[in-house]
Structures are given as structure tokens and as C-alpha cells.
């Protein structure tokens, strides 16, 4: 599919009412208007579950559009960001105690009011998602969707060979059992080690409590992925807009 995977520009027009579908697709970064017409002609676009036709007009603020089965967000008012939260920053947009918060890193680059999806405690760092799409944010945080999250942790070592099996079998905590979806030792240097683990739990301090329970307290914790979204080489304190492909992957992960 001829898509350039760009997110809509923050300066892109906000539509108020129905527009030609190919114009909406082009404005969302799918491709040129002619390329979008070809996609519609080839029956690769659906609107609200119906195969679209040339000449269709839709309202991008309410229509559910899929291109080649992937959800396309055409509403230019919606914002999807990835942020690398630094250590020492609280996971709130603003803090009544005057501590450094997430909004302090956005400046004037984002005109819309966004909210954080989930949390990281102040001593932890890494990937956070910010959006003003309340429906998607709710699904990403709801336990029933089991969104996997991956963490890189520095812990006390050495790491026993059977730790991964123990974590996969489940560890009983004071508020119930927790199991790890994946675990590996990244590096081990005697008294310290780096481990990576993936789990779909969202309880408070769950990773720190889990590793402390098995005798390996955490000295540093970095979240490296949330579902299909990866932290990558995003520098601490920086944000970036998710691509169309990443947003589509998030919707797919929550069953849309």
C-alpha cells in the first residue's frame, strides 16, 4: 500500500463535516490524492465496516476508516505521542507540589491537551504514551486487554538459572499472583545484573515488588515497550509523534 506512515501535521486543517474520502486519506498522510483514489477503487478502504466507493463523503471526526485492514485516524485533532520519561519526573501532567512533571517537557509543541496512558513511578524511566484519544487510552489501560509491557532492570546478582521458570510459573504477592510472559538475562557482572522481562500486569510498582520478592531488588528500571510501541533511541525527556502504522498497531492490539 503506498503509504508514507506520517502522522498528520499539527497544523493540518480540522474538518467540520463531510469531505471527499480521498481528500481525507491524503491529508492523513496515506499518499497523494490520486493514490488514495486508486486505493478506494481497488476496494482497499472501508468506512464504518462498509467497502468505500469513489465519491464517498465522510466526516473524519466520527468515521471509522480502515485501509488494508488497518485503522486510520483521520481526525487531525487527535494526538498520539511517545515520551521517554526521565528518572525523577512524576507521571502527572502537572504537579501540585511543584515537582517536575510531564507537561514541563512538552512546551508549546503540542497545542492539544494530552494525558498520559498509565504511569511510571518517579524513580523509574522510559516509555510513556500521551494522547487525547480517551477511548484508545481507556482500552490500553484496561486489564481485560492485557497490554504487554517490557522493562529493562538493573538488579542485584547473581541470577540463578531457574529464575525465568519461577517467574513464568507465577509469584504470589500480597495483592495476588503475578506471572511473567518473557524473561532473559541481558548481562551479569557478579553482584549486579541486567534483566529484561515482559508482563501484562498494571498494578502499582509491580515489577519492583516482583523482583524484590524473588531476592533481586531493582536499582534501575526502564520501560522499553508498550505493546507494539518501542522506546528505541528516543532520548530522555524527548517526545515524538507516533506514525500512522504505530497508531494502527495500537488499535489492532486492543481489537479494533
Image (spheres, rainbow, N blue to C red):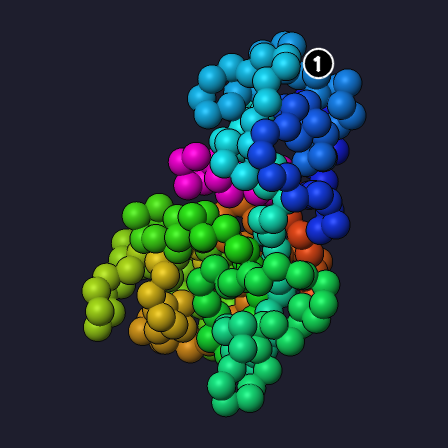
How many residues crowd mark 1 within 10 Å: few (<14), some (14–19), many (20+)? some
Question: In the drawing, does residue 156 fall left or right of residue 112?
Answer: left
Q: Where is residue 131 in the image (x, y as percent from the top left)?
A: 54, 56
State whether the magenta stretch is mostly helix, strand or loop: helix
Which contiguous range is marked in magenta?
Answer: 244-256
Quarter of image, res 188: bottom right
Quarter of image, res 41: top right
Location of the C terminus by quadrant is top left
Instruction: Please state which of residues 33 and 84 is positioned toward the viewer in this rendering.
Output: 33
| Rendered position, 211 above or below 35 | below
Instruction: Please state which of residues 73 and 220 is positioned toward the viewer in this rendering.
Output: 73
Asked if residue 108 can be seen in this view, the reply is yes
Name the residue tied to disc 1: 38
Q: Position of residue 97 (x, y in %)?
A: 50, 89
Q: Which residue is drawn at 71% across and 51% down?
A: 10
Please tell me how many numbered marks the rendered image carries: 1
Element assignment for label 1: helix
Q: Residue at x 67, y 72 (%)?
A: 105
Asked if residue 3 can be seen in this view, the reply is no
| Rendered position, 239 above or below 205 | above
Q: Residue at x 61, y 72 (%)?
A: 103
Q: Where is residue 93 in the image (x, y as percent from the top left)?
A: 54, 72
Quarter of image, res 235: bottom right
Q: Where is residue 116 in the image (x, y as percent from the top left)?
A: 51, 63
Amino acid at each position: 500500500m503506498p503509504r508514507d506512515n506520517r502522522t498528520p501535521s499539527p497544523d493540518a486543517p480540522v474538518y467540520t463535516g463531510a469531505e471527499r474520502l480521498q481528500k481525507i486519506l491524503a491529508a492523513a498522510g496515506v499518499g497523494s490524492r490520486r493514490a488514495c483514489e486508486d486505493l478506494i477503487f481497488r476496494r482497499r478502504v472501508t468506512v464504518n465496516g462498509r467497502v468505500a466507493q469513489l465519491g464517498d463523503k465522510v466526516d473524519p471526526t466520527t468515521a471509522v476508516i480502515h485501509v488494508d485492514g488497518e485503522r486510520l485516524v483521520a481526525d487531525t485533532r487527535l494526538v498520539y505521542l511517545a515520551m521517554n520519561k526521565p528518572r525523577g519526573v512524576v507521571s502527572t501532567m502537572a504537579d501540585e507540589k511543584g515537582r517536575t512533571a510531564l507537561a514541563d517537557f512538552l512546551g508549546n509543541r503540542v497545542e492539544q491537551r494530552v494525558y498520559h496512558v498509565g504511569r511510571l513511578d518517579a524513580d523509574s524511566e522510559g516509555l510513556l504514551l500521551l494522547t487525547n484519544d480517551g477511548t484508545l487510552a481507556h482500552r490500553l489501560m484496561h486489564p481485560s486487554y492485557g497490554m504487554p509491557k517490557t522493562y529493562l532492570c538493573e538488579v542485584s546478582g547473581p541470577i540463578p538459572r531457574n529464575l525465568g521458570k519461577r517467574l513464568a510459573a507465577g509469584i504470589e504477592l500480597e495483592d495476588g499472583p503475578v506471572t511473567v510472559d518473557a524473561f532473559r538475562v541481558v548481562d551479569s557482572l557478579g553482584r549486579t545484573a541486567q534483566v529484561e522481562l515482559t508482563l501484562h500486569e498494571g498494578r502499582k510498582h509491580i515489577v519492583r515488588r516482583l523482583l524484590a520478592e524473588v531476592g533481586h531488588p531493582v536499582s534501575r528500571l526502564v520501560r522499553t515497550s508498550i505493546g507494539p510501541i518501542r522506546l528505541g533511541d528516543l532520548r530522555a525527556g524527548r517526545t515524538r509523534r507516533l506514525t500512522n502504522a504505530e497508531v494502527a498497531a495500537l488499535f489492532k492490539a486492543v481489537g479494533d
